[in-house]
Image: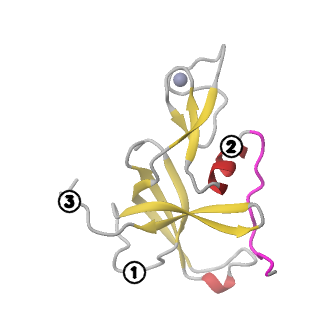
Amino acid sequence: MTEYAKPVPVPDEETAPFWEAARRHELAFQRCDHCGTYAHPPVSFCRGCHNVAEPSFHFAAVNPRGKILNWTVMRDAMVRGFTDDVPWVHALVSFDDQPSLTFTATLVDGVGDRLKLGAPVEMVFKDVSLGVTLPVFKLAQGSPHGSG
Ligand SMILES: [Zn+2]
């Protein structure tokens, strides 16, 4: 068995449901039981309804399609295990159905002509090690209609 040489996430009590969903290849974010507002990263009280008396949340699925808001091209590995990957792209994405939610992850397509602000992407899941699945972005097929 090949050992995975990169750092992997260490879920805590608040983030475990996110990583459990990722293992099922599903995107799920914390959602307020009172008003339905999503949050990422998880919060201890809702920024939508500010219910501090009885905060209550569950993790709910979110459509994994979104758009690139910004990106960084990593040209220096800096962290052990990434040397063979440079240059790679780390993208900031907002989700189509929840535009206030943003997430950063590797864009697996790397640097290329299709890497543009607003380019459509979708989150896909990469099983990297026993019990560890990482969310990454992939450019979506086709072109968006309109100038949106
Ligand atoms: Zn709320």
Please name the amino acid that badge 2 sits on. Answer: Pro
Is disc 2 placed on a helix, strand or loop? Answer: helix
Checking the image for residue 112, the label placed there is 1
Question: Disc 1, disc 3: CB below 8 Å?
Answer: no
Q: Residue at x 64, y 34 (%)?
A: 43
Q: Residue at x 62, y 28 (%)?
A: 57
Q: Position of residue 96 (x, y in %)?
A: 37, 48
Q: Is residue 10 left or right of residue 41?
A: right
Q: Position of residue 137 (x, y in %)?
A: 50, 64
Please name the amino acid that badge 1 sits on. Answer: Gly
Q: Position of residue 28 (x, y in %)?
A: 57, 45
Question: Mark 2 = which residue?
Answer: 17
Q: Position of residue 25 (x, y in %)?
A: 59, 57
Q: CA distance from mark 1 to mark 3?
A: 21 Å
Magenta range is 2-13
Is disc 1 placed on a helix, strand or loop? Answer: loop
Is disc 3 placed on a helix, strand or loop? Answer: loop
Please name the amino acid that badge 3 sits on. Answer: His
Chain-order first, disc 2 or disc 1: 2
**Label 2 residue near ligand 1, CB within 8 Å:** no
Q: Is residue 34 left or right of residue 65?
A: right
Q: CA distance from mark 3 to mark 2?
A: 35 Å
Q: Is residue 125 above or below residue 78?
A: above
> Within the image, what quadrant is residue 3 found in?
bottom right
Checking the image for residue 65, the label placed there is none
Chain-order first, disc 1 or disc 3: 1
Q: Dividing the image into 4 quarters, which one contains the N terminus?
A: bottom right
Chain-order first, disc 3 or disc 2: 2
Question: Mark 3 = which residue?
Answer: 145
Q: Residue at x 54, y 20 (%)?
A: 34
